[in-house]
Amino acid sequence: MKKRILSGIQPTGDVHLGNYFGMMKPAIELQGEGETYLFIADLHALTSSMAPEDLRRNSFNVALDFLSCGLDPAKTIFFRQSEVPEVTELAWILSCQTSMGLLERCHSYKDKTSKGMVPNHGLFAYPVLMAADILIYKSTLVPVGRDQKQHLEVTRDIAVRFNNRYGDILAIPEPIIRDSTAIVPGTDGEKMSKSYGNTIELFGDEKELRKKVMGIVTDSKGLDDPKNPDECTPFLLYKLFVDGGKAAEMAEKLRKGGYGYGHAKKELFEIYWEHFRPFRDKRSEYLKDPARVEGILADGARKARAVAQDTMREIRKAAGIGG
Ligand code: ADP
Ligand code: TRP
């Protein structure tokens, strides 16, 4: 079967290092290894109560971020989820194949409600729309961070059930989760996430970002004390940017003592700021030409929609709906 790589991201705020290493970078590196689809999950973002103008602005900014970080529109079909309305039709059809129990077990739903988010039906049905996103393009590989693993399991479950009932129509997708970047830690050492307020963004004001990096929480060991690199968040982040040799050097300095957390943070900031420098330059170019960004998204939506419509023709026929 043809390799089809697909991933999506909710436009719920500025893209951070967790998103970058967990999903963006792997997805961008896979471009060209098969047909690649990347989309901005603006329909999923409706499950949170964002103001319309914020949603529209965030969607555009996420597009800018992906294009600046190396998404190549000649290799990747890049679009807004909502520009392919067929996906909501498929979500309904899949809903009718999805048990309540399967959705009730989803950690992401349970986490959000336990944190006080008042659930709407969209939040509960979120994994079904995500399954539709994946299945409508017959995707085979889905690069994501570890927090999305269960949603991929739900997708596979729904696809198997659907195929058992209606015939072998849907591809059963595999997640791609890199061990080294499965959970990128945030400034407080917990999983980096927009909802925890512990993020380091890819782009923004240098001073503010330096402050965030220098504010990463560490234990209270003094300059001379030997330190455990595996418990040092600045090191864990630094490691993501450098090769094994450089990482081993910093680990050794930490273990030896005489090298403080402040030093590690400084080195981290430098490598991080340099890493995104060319992307920052590209971003300011795109920013001057929003019509170009919209053109890329429109072109992607047209291509994605043609594929989605083909799948829906097959599905409608198999499910006995339509003429
Ligand atoms: P957030 O938790 O900040 O709201 P999203 O849910 O929008 O992030 O995640 C978008 C993509 O980035 C997903 O594939 C997710 O798995 C990945 N991702 C997010 N945070 C991390 C992290 N800390 N480590 C690894 N991957 C992450
Ligand atoms: N749920 C994903 C997240 O929060 C975003 C998403 C929506 C997605 N549809 C998808 C990811 C399909 C991969 C494939 O990160």
Image (tube, helix red, strand yellow):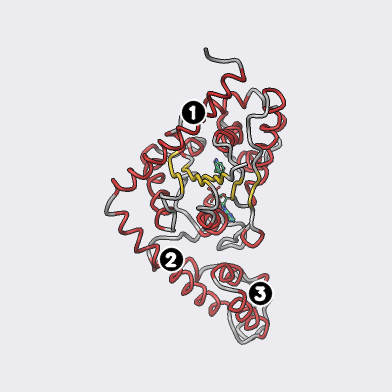
SS for tag 2?
A: loop
x and y, in percent, of residue 130 in the image: 57, 37
Dot 2 or dot 3, earlier in sequence: 3
Please name the residue shown 71% across and 28% down the image.
Answer: 161
SS for tag 1?
A: helix
* Residue type marked 2: Phe
Task: Give me the C-alpha separation between circle 3 and circle 1.
Answer: 51 Å
Q: Which mark is residue 204?
A: none
* Residue type marked 1: Gln
Dot 1 or dot 2, earlier in sequence: 2
* Residue type marked 3: Pro
Please name the residue shown 66% across and 38% down the image.
Answer: 172
Apparent side of residue 204 relative to residue 34 in the rendered image (left or right)? left
x and y, in percent, of residue 179 in the image: 67, 59
Front one among 13 and 218: 13
Which residue is denoted by mark 2 in the rendering? Answer: 276
Q: Which mark is residue 309?
A: 1
SS for tag 3?
A: helix
Label 3: few (<14), some or many (≥20) within 10 Å?
A: some
Is residue 231 visible in the rendered image? The answer is yes
Please name the residue shown 38% across and 46% down the image.
Answer: 60
Q: Indicate the quadrant where residue 93 lies.
A: top right
Label 2: few (<14), some or many (≥20) within 10 Å?
A: some
Which residue is denoted by mark 3 in the rendering? Answer: 229
> Do labels 1 and 2 touch, CB within 8 Å?
no
- Against 228, residue 149 (above or below) is above
Residue depth check, mark 2 versus mark 3: number of the one nearer the observer: 2
